[in-house]
Image: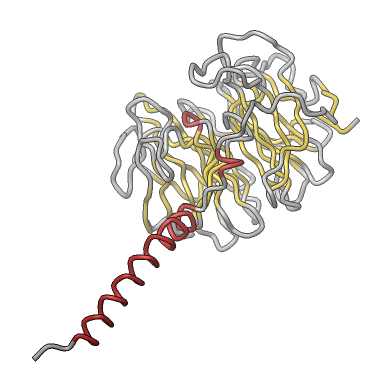
Amino acid sequence: MRHPARVEYLLGLAVLALIATSVLTPVLRSHAQGINQATAQPAAPINSLPNPYRSVENWARMPDGRTWGSSAGVYVDPAGTSVWVAVGSDLPPILRFDMSGRLLKAFGAGMFVFPHGIFVDQEGNVWVTEAQGKDGKGHQVFKFSPEGKVLLTLGKAGVAGNGPDEFNAPSAVLVAPNGDIFVGDGHGGDTNARIVKFNKDGKFIKTWGKKGAAPGDIDIPHTLAMDSRGRLFLGDRQNNRIQIFDQNGAFLDQWSQFSRPSGVFIDKNDTIYVADSESESVSKNHDGWKRGIRIGRVSDGVVTGFIPDPVEKATGSSAAEGVAADPAGNIYGAEVGPKRLMKYVKK
């Protein structure tokens, strides 16, 4: 027995389903990726914004006879009372300065091949990544007390790998307010390209990311920061962008308006500071963008200020690679090539 009315009804439902799919699929895809095209790929390099800061050279004072090494990482403790720096040196490479630039503490001698990323958690503990491996050392993340006692070690000394308890050139570390630990694992070449998450005790939770350029892919996870909403900002350096994830690794957005991110810092007011130390020098894929520190708002991704690299032409890393800010709004730039720590104060 035939049922013409029923057949027409089913055909109508099929047509409606096709229409709904064609309309909603792009919307859902856009929502899933969360990409704001205006920030994902700016129309032109952002180089000409006002510079509201003046530089203060030789702010941080070394003891007599000690010179600066290459400085990749800098962080201001949550209390705003100390500036911590990681430098390349055979001498103790983890340095603590007071806000006047006086050296208070130095530790970690003989522990590192290449100390790189540095972070200070809410309890004042200092986290440092070791981004190379040699002679049974390296490829690890250390948690120190403010006095320099080792409280926790992640990774295997001198072993490069991609297992849950291994790293290959970890560049950055960040600790969330709940104690979860995030490591940006990799520093280009044949190293890793992922984020690894642990609980507060160092127990592996998960990892995400693979080498590539698509949304969610990573190529040099060089720096990490977190905003007041708990979103994770990754300086995906070789891809010339910041990627934004939730704490479970879901991709939320990507920003390119802050140039090539070597360092990212977000203060308690959700002001974002991004250091570009490689455009038109080390980088061969980011012409037109000037090196320096770009300042902006997390709320809408707008860049509001720019501290340019005073060196117009460079072939190596120049200007700040690591960046941080204190509660007064002063900015600190750790420089690898020039081997110094710069301070910038508002004019």
State whether residue 176 is above or below residue 111: below
> Measuring 63% from the left and 17% from the top, which residue is drawn there?
318
User: Going by the picture, which residue comes out furthest to the right?
Assistant: 347
User: Going by the picture, which residue comes out furthest to the bottom?
Assistant: 1
Instruction: State left or right for residue 157 relative to residue 115.
Output: left
Instruction: State left or right for residue 142 relative to residue 256.
Output: left
Query: Of 80 and 325, which appears nearest the observer?
Result: 325
Query: Of 258 and 148, which appears nearest the observer?
Result: 258
Instruction: Answer whether residue 171 is visible to the viewer in this image.
Output: yes
What is the quadrant of residue 88 in the picture? Answer: top right
* Quadrant (top left, top right, bottom left, bottom right) of the N terminus: bottom left
User: Going by the picture, which residue comes out furthest to the left?
Assistant: 1
State whether residue 157 is above or below residue 23: above
Q: Give the number of callouts.
A: 0
Question: How far across and how far down the image is residue 343, in percent?
Answer: 78, 28
> Measuring 12% from the left and 88% from the top, which residue is drawn there?
2
Question: How far across and how far down the image is residue 345, in percent?
Answer: 85, 32
What is the quadrant of residue 167 in the picture? Answer: top left
* Quadrant (top left, top right, bottom left, bottom right) of the C terminus: top right
